Structure formats: structure tokens, C-alpha cells
Image: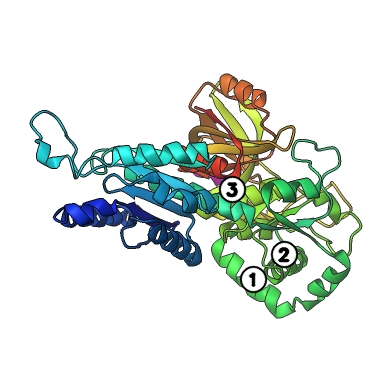
Amino acid sequence: MRRPKAGLLCLYVKLYDDTQAWLRKDVEWFQEQIAQKLEQAGLELFRHDICRQEEEFQSAIAEFEEQGADVVITLHLAYSPSLESEQVLKNTSLPILVLDTTPDYSFDGITGAGRIMQNHGIHGVQDMCSLLRRNNVAYEVFAGHYLESDVIKNVSEAAKGAMMAARMKQCRVGRVGEPFTGMGDFCLPDEVLQEKTGISIFDYDFNESVDLLESITEADIKAEWEMDCERFVCRDLTFDVYAESARVNLAMRKWIGKNNLDAFTVNFMATDENPALPRMPFMETCKAMEAGIGYAGEGDVLTASFTAALMKGFEETTFAEMFCPDWKGNTVFLSHMGEYNLRIGAGKPLLTELDFPYTSAGNPAALYGCMKEGRAAFVNLNPLSEGRFVLIMATGNMVEMTETSPDFEKTVRGWFRPDVQVSEFLSRYSKAGGGHHGAIVYYAGETALRMMAEVMGWEFCLIG
């Protein structure tokens, strides 16, 4: 998983270089301290000389854009006149994170006037942000002392959110079959989805896909079988059933690679009387998510793309649906037919034959397991009216069940305990318009998801 890329834009004023050159040593020291802290917080940082005049700001931003930065982080080393940076910050497409901090933690009556020059960057922040707001430029401000608060961590998390938004805007998502008939929560015309989110949709060509199936050799299947027998607990599964499933799964993997897809979705109903999809590729949905490819069921390209974007910042993310409330235990049971990210499983998954009565397709091989315990959030992206979207984040924990019925073994399963009572969680979730497709994101940060929503222009709803 790559680190977020950030350009550090350090703002200063030429007047101080001309009249108080002694100050330069102090501000360069502070610049280096902040750069080191940001890198330690997980950012790939692009540095540039301290900027004072318009042409210097233009040079810095152009360099950051060329280097592929996800965000610009501004740092006022002292006062900086806002008109020097106005135009370039107004015109850049990079999200702007304002780091509002100073060298000294305390500035009280005994600090001394000799430290004013090193610690007065906040009114440069105010000058700049006044123009950003006036020019309708999106930005976020993170204020606090760089050593005595979480401000560096929060900036890093926000950069992660911007990186996830960039992944969403550029997402290449494949769709196998039409969206499930009658499912309305994720249903939008393709042209609306593409216009509002930036995703590109690639439909599975069933005519060409017959050739993909035929390209999978017996040696390919045997090699996959040997790896799977090593990785998983294989039970109640013949090699013939596995082989027919593996052929479809490996063909799906080839299609994903051939089209350089970031995400995909499969409607299991597309397997009905379809020689190009004779089995539902459950195994590949699990393995693809493990490899960082987003997924959602039932032809849902929106949630598949959203899951791919979330994985850019949080590898332990899986497509999930809420199935059953446990009012007594204050949890919600999560599951799906046979799709989950193997990264979030507890113990070795079970590889077995799945009874598949839904279409004329043969029974597929499928992977089952339990989602591990840990801090997590249930996250949903849902369309609203007039081209708007809402990102819903419900915080809580995935919990371990100390006792489970044996018949749970052949299910994808997990129990989510929200930070509020399950009754309140379900009420607020549906009141916010949350749909039935979502994702479990382990160790998700509110700052990152809120920033993702900000960059995408989505509403943000926190339940927790």
C-alpha cells in the first residue's frame, strides 16, 4: 500500500529576508522539524524552497503537481501576504491542507517578546484562508502544536483521505452482468455515475469471455489447486467442482488484469444459462479483495469503486452487508453469499462446495470465514437527489463470538457492535439514507473519511 504523497508549501515574506536575515535560520529549522514529523507520520513528502513571492509559489505548486502529489500542505513559517499565493492556490486542483502550528508550545507572559517573530504565523494563515474562502477554494485547517497535539497525525490522515478520493475519481470498475433487477439504493444511470464520481465502467463481454475460459489450462488449474490446498482448509469439495470453478475464477482474474481494473462487481444472476459464466467466481472475489481490488455484489459499480478507494488507505476493508440485528447482544450480523476480503479473516478460511440454487449454474467452490475482532467502521456511500451523495460512517468494533453454531461454518460471517445502541444505529443509519451495500473498514479514521467526502463533494454523516 503506497503512502499518501504531499507537497509541503512553506510560506514566508521577502521583507523579513531583506530586513531581519537572522530569522531565516530559525524558520528553516522549523521547516525541517515539520517535514521530518510529516514523514514519520507516513507521508511521502515533496519539499520545495521556502516561498515568498508569486513566482516562487507557482514554481512549487507546478512541481508538486508534476510529482503526482495527492495534497498540498501549507505551513506558515511567519506572516506571508496572501496575494502572493492567491492565484496559484485558487487554480490548483490539489486539495489544500492548512497546517496551523508554531515552534513554541507556550506563549505566555514569561515567554518573552523575543519569540514573537518565530511564532506569529497564525495571522498569515488567517490572511490566506480569508482569500481561499472568498475564492470558493476547498481547504481544511488543522491547528495545534506539532509536538503536543494530534495535528501532525490528523494532517497525515487527511492526506490519506485525499488519496482515496483521487482513487475514486480515477477508478476503473468492471461489471459482470446487469445490476440486480429491482435493487434501487445503488441504482443510478451510468452516465450520472461517471459524471458525478469520475469512475469508468467496463462491461464484461460474454462473447469474448468464452475465449478467456478456453485459455485457462489444466496446469493453471492444478497450480491454483495446490496453492489453495496449502492456504485453506479444504472440505466437502471434489477436484472436479473445484476445477470448473477455478477455470472461471482464473478467467476473471485475466479479465481484471487485461483491463487494468481497480474494482469489479458480479451479479450472480448472470450465471443463469450462460456458458461464458458457468459458475459464480466467489473465490476470485475474495482473492481480488485481498490483492487490493475493490468489489461489491449484484452489479453495484458504485460500492465496488468506493471499496477500491477505501482500500487505498485501509487495506483491511471488505464488502459487507448487514443481515440480522442481535438486539440482545447489541450487534449486527454481517455476511454475504461468499465474498469477503481474506485479509480480515480470523484463522484459515474453509474452501468448500457451495449449494447454489439461484440459477441453472453448477455449484461453485467458495471460501468461508469469520471476520476478525478489532476496531472498525461500517461505511456506506449512497446517492441522494440532485446528484448528491452521502458518505455514512458508523464507528464500533468487530467482536468475537465465543460460541457459534456449527452451521455458521459455511457462511461468511462477522458481528459488528456499534458505539451506540444497535437500535439507535439502525435508526440513524436508515434516516441518513444508508443503503444495504457497504464496507467494513478496520481501524478507519474519521479524519480520513471526512476528508475523502470533502474532496469528492459528498455529504458526511457520522454515527458513533
Q: In which quadrant of the rendered view does residue 454 lie? A: top right
Q: Using the numbered discs, state the Cα–Cα distance from disc 2 to disc 1 in whole angstroms.
A: 10 Å
Question: Are there few (<14), some (14-19), or many (20+) residues within 10 Å of tag 1?
Answer: some
Q: Indicate left or right for 143 with 316 as reference.
A: left
Q: Using the numbered discs, state the Cα–Cα distance from disc 3 to disc 2 in whole angstroms.
A: 19 Å
The x and y percentages for residue 16 are 22, 51
The x and y percentages for residue 124 are 33, 41
Say whether marks 2 and 1 touch (CB < 8 Å): yes
Tag 2 or tag 3, which sits nearer the N-term? 2
Q: Indicate left or right for 228 with 358 as reference.
A: left
Q: Residue at x 33, y 55 (%)?
A: 52
Relative to the observer, which residue lies in front, 408 or 89? 89
Which residue is the site of mark 3?
A: 318
The x and y percentages for residue 59 are 42, 63
Which residue is the site of mark 1?
A: 224
Say whether marks 3 and 1 touch (CB < 8 Å): no
Q: Residue at x 66, y 51 (%)?
A: 305
Name, please, the residue furthest toward the right.
Answer: 273
Q: Kindly identify the amino acid type of the residue bearing the numbered disc 1.
A: Glu
Asked which colour scheme the image uses, the reply is rainbow
Say whether marks 3 and 2 touch (CB < 8 Å): no
Can residue 388 be seen here? The reply is yes
Which residue is the site of mark 2?
A: 249
Question: Are there few (<14), some (14-19), or many (20+) residues within 10 Å of tag 2?
Answer: many
Q: Using the numbered discs, state the Cα–Cα distance from disc 3 to disc 1 in whole angstroms.
A: 23 Å
Q: Kindly identify the amino acid type of the residue bearing the numbered disc 3.
A: Thr
Tag 1 or tag 3, which sits nearer the N-term? 1
Q: Give SS at disc 1.
A: helix
Where does the magenta region start and end? 370-374
